[in-house]
Image (cartoon, rainbow, N blue to C red):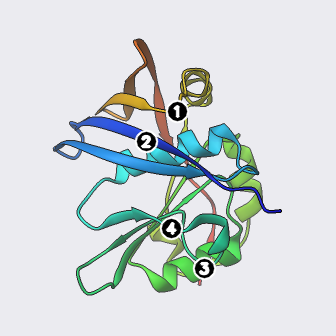
Amino acid sequence: MALNATLYPFEIELADADRGVYQSFALRAARHPSEAEEFLVARVLAYCLEYTEGIGFSKGLSSPDEPAIFVRDLTGRLHAWIDIGVPDAARLHRAAKAASRVAVYTHKDPALLRAALAGARIHRSEHLALFALDRSLVAALCEGLGRRNAWSVAVSGSHLYVGAGGRACDGTLAPIVLDLQRA
């Protein structure tokens, strides 16, 4: 018998001074039993950092050819492909052909992403937006993760401040620079 995903409701208060986005929204994130808590937390943080009209989560493991997070316009056209973790070069190559913006947020050691993409030919590689989430921030948010979550997320100068469950956590959002060939 297949195990079902667990839904985690989030109430988010977002204040992204870097992009001028100030929004309150409810979010339901599904966590598959094989998915680590760190991946779930990284997905929610990436959703907040990319928040815009038309953003949404894919169906997850049942849709491996889709991004973890997407941004579509009203016609359904894909504008942004946002992945989490350490996607391979072939996936990012396809993503760059499918969407005008491709971003990756990794909650793992950035060296793993650099190694996975080293020397790879990726379509429009110069436009990839790669970021390393502060691993201690992700770990702290995992510790306070509950079945219902209320987060206040503030972004300023590539620094994240997250209030979650009565705790204040903070960390950096560091850009990752790769030496890639252009496709």
Q: Which residue is mark 4?
A: 58
Between discs 2 and 4, the one toward the N terminus: 2
Please report the residue visible at 50 percent of the width from the left and 78 percent of the height from the top.
96
Residue 93 location, x and y as percent? 60, 79
- Three-letter residue code for mark 3: His
Residue under label 3, please give it.
93
Q: Which numbered disc, 2 or 4, marks the residue closer to the eye?
A: 2
Q: Which residue is mark 2?
A: 9
Q: CA distance from mark 3 to mark 4?
A: 19 Å
Residue density around tag 1, few if under 14, some if 14–19, many if 20 or more, within 10 Å: few
Q: CA distance from mark 1 to mark 2?
A: 7 Å
Q: Quarter of the image containing the N terminus?
A: bottom right
Residue 167 on image: x %, y %: 43, 12
SS class, disc 4: loop
Q: Tell which tag, 1 or 4, sits nearer the viewer.
A: 1
Question: Which residue type does callout 2 highlight?
Answer: Pro
In this rendering, does residue 182 appear at all? no
Question: Do callouts 3 and 4 mark residues in contact (Cβ within 8 Å)?
Answer: no
Looking at the image, residue 4 sits to the left or right of residue 44; the answer is right
User: Where is 88 relative to 162, above or below?
Assistant: below
- How far across and down, in percent of the image, does residue 145 sit? 55, 28
Label 1 with label 2: CB-CB less than 8 Å: yes
Q: Tell me what residue is drawn at x 36 percent, y 29 percent.
A: 151
Q: Is residue 38 above or below residue 52?
A: above
110 with respect to 16 (left or right): right
Disc 1 marks which amino acid? Arg
Q: Upstream in the sequence, badge 3 or badge 1? A: 3
Residue 147's disc number: 1
Give the alpha-carbon distance from disc 2 to disc 3, as whole Å.
32 Å
Q: Are marks 2 and 4 in contact (CB under 8 Å)?
A: no
